[in-house]
């Protein structure tokens, strides 16, 4: 049995409505990543005593904005951490990541195409920054590190998130040893 608590990651952005793969390929071929930056990096322990985290729910909201020469995407990540009973919130972690893209000449993408780009391209670009932010900030406030699961193509977000006690074996470690 693992000491890790596990829960789903919730993606609050609306689902993609564009089914034009050629249009997405064209947008990707005309876009280039200019930079990725952290706009918010916040963690707060909401109790003065030592706590154990029981439940973790990671919510991700995304938005975009067209500019004259490209566009930017913004991902707001909120990870409230609850006590094992689920009755009390014990910590709050937020990370906001902005990715700027240039866009070569051509038609400006419509809403549906931008949503598809965010879900299938931009989220994969910023995911390492989100993962590192949650992991680092949870440890900085004295909690066990947060790890979020793999991001798979065709899925809106990773499907799992958990906290692992440092040095404690997981169910996977036990299975690998056999």
Image (cartoon, grey):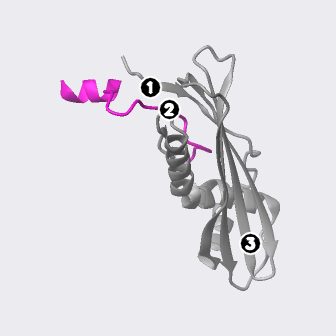
**Camera-side residue: 79 or 25?**
79
Using the image as rendered, state which of residue 114 and residue 46 is in the foreground. Answer: 46
Which label lies toward us, 3 or 1? 1
Task: Tell me where residue 67 appears, x and y as whole percent.
Answer: 80, 76
Residue, disc 1: 4
In the rendered structure, the answer to whether residue 79 lies left or right of residue 3 reads: right
Q: Residue at x 62, y 45 (%)?
A: 156
Whole-number angstrom distance, CA of label 3 to CA of label 1: 39 Å
Q: Is residue 168 magenta?
A: yes
Q: How many marks?
A: 3
Residue lying at the far front of the rendered structure: 48
Q: Which residues are magenta?
A: 154-178
Instruction: Give the residue at mark 2.
Output: 162
**Quadrant position of the C terminus in the picture:** top left
Could you tell me how far apart the alpha carbons at marks 1 and 2 are, in whole angstroms? Answer: 6 Å
Whichever of callouts 2 and 3 sits on the residue coming sooner in the sequence is 3
Tag 3 secondary structure: strand
For the question of whether residue 25 can be seen, the reply is no
Q: Which residue is mark 3?
A: 71
Query: Which is more foreground, mark 2 or mark 3?
Result: 2
Q: Does residue 87 sit above or below 150 in this rendering?
A: above
Quadrant of the image occupied by residue 46: top right
Q: Are marks 2 and 3 in contact (CB under 8 Å)?
A: no
- Which quadrant would the N terminus be assigned to in this image? top left
């Amino acid at each position: 049995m693992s000491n890790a608590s596990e829960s789903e990651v919730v993606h609050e952005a609306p689902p993609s409505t564009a089914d034009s793969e050629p249009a997405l390929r064209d947008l990707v071929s005309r876009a280039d990543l200019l930079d990725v930056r952290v706009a918010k990096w916040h963690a707060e322990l909401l109790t003065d005593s030592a706590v154990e985290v029981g439940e973790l729910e990671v919510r991700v909201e995304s938005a975009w904005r067209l500019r004259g020469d490209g566009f930017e995407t913004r991902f707001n990540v909120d990870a409230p951490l609850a006590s094992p009973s689920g009755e009390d919130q014990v910590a709050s972690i937020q990370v906001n990541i902005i990715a700027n893209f240039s866009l070569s000449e051509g038609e400006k993408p419509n809403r549906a195409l931008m949503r598809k780009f965010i879900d299938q391209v931009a989220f994969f670009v910023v995911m390492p920054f989100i993962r590192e932010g949650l992991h680092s900030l949870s440890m900085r406030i004295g909690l066990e590190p947060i790890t979020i699961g793999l991001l798979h193509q065709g899925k809106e977000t990773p499907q799992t998130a958990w906290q692992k006690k440092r040095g404690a074996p997981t169910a996977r470690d036990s299975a690998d040893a056999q």
